[in-house]
Image (tube, rainbow, N blue to C red):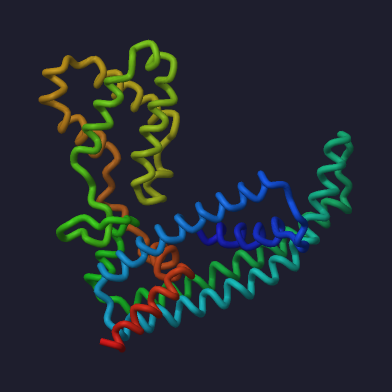
Amino acid sequence: MRYLYLIVLTGMFLLGTSGCQAGPVPALAASTKAEGLDQVANLRRDVQLLNLINGLELSVEQMQFILDRAREAEAIREEIKGRAEGNAAATSQVLGKLREILLHGEVISSELRGEFFSVEGENHVLKEEWEQEIARLALEVEEGLEGHQLYALERYVPCVIPPKGEARIGQAEDPHAGQALLQRIRDIPAEQFEVRKERIAQRVLERVLGRLPKGRALAFDQEEEIEWMLGFLEKVRGLDEMTFAVRKEQLVEEVKSRYASPEVPVDVSVKIERHLLDPRIIPLLEDKLALRSEG
């Protein structure tokens, strides 16, 4: 996530234009569609963050504290963005030279190698600086939260409609979702399954591992797990309807138990960086504080 910020910041500069040239109608239509999709994505993100803010039941003091840190993070982000943009021209020039040389099958000179590592060094410095600053701010926010709030934040999964009950700030795990997935896999025609079974097993594995902490997910051998998942799915498909109906809950638990990791803690600082220091939280907290003061 931290590295993604720098990629986005540099990409914004490289993909920008400096003029106002008139384009064809299809391009304008595509631009309008893109703006509409961006608006939907932004509104969805706002709703997710508001669910988090409300679910944590932050005090006025906590909201102001987080707002101040989010503003500081945004200021640092903009400052590093400016420096990244300044280095983008040099990076683009070097990459352009490399592209031409490689297109012609020529050997990269030691001078060009030096230029590349020089600009890459500058980018690495910016990345490290951002990581240090955002980690510092995340730690300050973490120290300002209560134990029960940290517990809730560890289990937070972005959602649009919060579930009822205790897990109101995160997406509740649907106990029937896994069973429904297995049923859909059973419904795939045999010919299609035989052709696509490796890909299906890979997609199911990605879905399972995607719900695990990053460190835990990386601990698994992908090829070995795809092989296990393929065998599991073939076993599920081989059951008759009555046996599947009786055992489907047990089958879902079999997958969960294989990848369960109660001993691997969630890094709450990463969630703070990703959510509570997201620049889109700034106007939301400002509005929430304004409403509190009016009330």
Q: Residue at x 15, y 33 (%)?
A: 249
Residue 40 is left or right of residue 143, and the answer is right
Judging depth in this view, the residue of 257 and 236 nearest the camera is 236
Judging depth in this view, the residue of 218 and 82 nearest the camera is 82
Count the marks.
0
**Residue 222 % position (x, y):** 44, 33
Residue 276 is left or right of residue 37, and the answer is left
Looking at the image, residue 228 lies above or below residue 176: above
Dividing the picture into quarters, in which one does residue 274 lie? bottom left
For the C terminus, give its image quadrant. bottom left
Dividing the picture into quarters, in which one does residue 3 lie? bottom right
Looking at the image, residue 66 lies above or below residue 19: below
Residue 277 is left or right of residue 24, and the answer is left
**Residue 159 % position (x, y):** 32, 55
Q: Residue at x 38, y 77 (%)?
A: 285
Q: Residue at x 35, y 64 (%)?
A: 268
Dividing the picture into quarters, in which one does residue 234 lie? top left
**Residue 128 % position (x, y):** 60, 66
The residue sitting at the front extreme is 25
Q: Residue at x 69, y 66 (%)?
A: 84
Judging depth in this view, the residue of 36 and 281 nearest the camera is 36
**Residue 101 % position (x, y):** 87, 41
